[in-house]
Amino acid sequence: MTTQLVLPAPERTLRARLKRRPFTHHNRLAAAVFVLNVALIPIVDASSMVLANFTLAVLIRQQYVINLLFWLATSVPTHWPLRIRWTMGKVYHFGGLHVGATICATAWFPFTAPSLVLTWVIVALLIAMIVLALPALRARQHDRFERAHRFGGWSVLALFGLHAMATASTTSLWVLAVVVFSVALPWLRLRRVPVRIDRPSRHVALVWFDHGVTPFAGSSTAVSRSPWLEWHSFANVPTPGQTGFRLTISRAGDWTGALIDDLPTHVWVKGIPTAGVGNIDRLFRKVVWVATGSGIGPCLPHLLAGDTPSLLVWSTRHPRQTYGDALVDEILAVQPEATIWDTDAGGKPDLLALAYQAYEQSGAEAVICISNKKTTWQIVEELEVRGVPAFGAIWDS
């Protein structure tokens, strides 16, 4: 790619403006839940609305349900119109349903049995969980958010059962049983497994698993060293033709730093491999992967599998010193035309321009960005307002 392309100006249409925050698909789904709840106020009782919203809020986060949603969305053939596939690719915004349903369930709950003290205890717990889940608070107090969400959620389930018995609601008990089973299912697969860790540098650890599970490309695994306190999800990197998989973990906080320094021999895993944003590549005939730093991890399984033709743009510090010659050579073996930008040698690149240039010159249909929040949102929004289908994580979980 030697010809420098000029990035076109953003479109000024209403459709383009709706590509920017706050009009994300995540927020649209949350708004749709609110509108539906308001529309049903005259015809549905509070208890039924609590049950419906509460069930939706929990099930939409269930790993099997998430995998089903991705399977349905990515089953659309690549010969369908691009606009349809563009919309289906936004399936990872399903968290908007969780947000909308949780807030609506909380709003309805005081009207179920307002005379019961238990009602207000549950409402207080739900409000506390919602407040801690606000993006600004969650970013600053992520560990507190995670623990409050887990233990607060379990407490709400237990209290909701008592509430159903106090109000003699048989239907609520049956629905609660389904919800409890959904929440418990990942924990039924909790296990401590051996790992082998390679540390090409003090910044990165390659964690290898081979405990009888070979996950699909584009999935993630939840990992912990203290299973009751905190969990971290990382993209699985299976190698075609081999059993097991690896995770690429970079130093990005206390937990990852401790793992890289300590090199544990075992970690805890739970649940099943769960689909992530990268899975939407199968909706397109060709995609551009844009990654910074350890964002190469979620891209790597797709590059190795080669199911969807692609071109990689990767910006990172000292790629070979940081990630090792073996990993860089592995990437170049399947992506010989990749742009690998060494930020120490070349400075910080104009990643948006590089992404657009790769998209135009490769004939791709979409761009998938795996980076930090600020960069991902910038790349996705700025490309979409220029008519380019773009996708990236939204940090809603």
Image: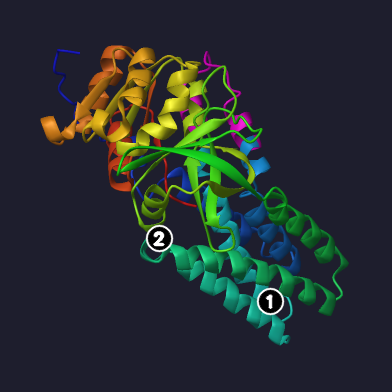
How has the structure been colored for display?
rainbow
User: In the image, is residue 163 above or below residue 296?
Assistant: below
| Residue type, label 1 | Phe
Q: Is residue 85 magenta?
A: yes
- Residue assigned mark 1: 111
Side of 130 relative to 311 (left or right): right
Disc sitting over residue 308 in the figure: none
Percent position of residue 246, x then y: 49, 33
Q: Is residue 370 visible?
A: no
Q: Is residue 104 magenta?
A: no
Magenta region, residue range: 68-90
User: In the image, is residue 353 above or below residue 264?
Assistant: above
Residue nearest the observer in this picture, 307 or 265: 265
Image-quadrant location for residue 160: bottom right
Which residue appears at 60% of the width and 58% of the height? Answer: 101
Residue nearest the observer in this picture, 151 or 56: 151
Image-quadrant location for residue 33: bottom right
N-terminal-most mark, 2 or 1: 1
Which secondary structure dominates the residues rendered in magenta? helix
Which element carries disc 2, helix, strand or loop? helix
User: In the image, is residue 11 above or below residue 59?
Assistant: above
Disc sitting over residue 135 in the figure: 2
Image-quadrant location for residue 363: top left
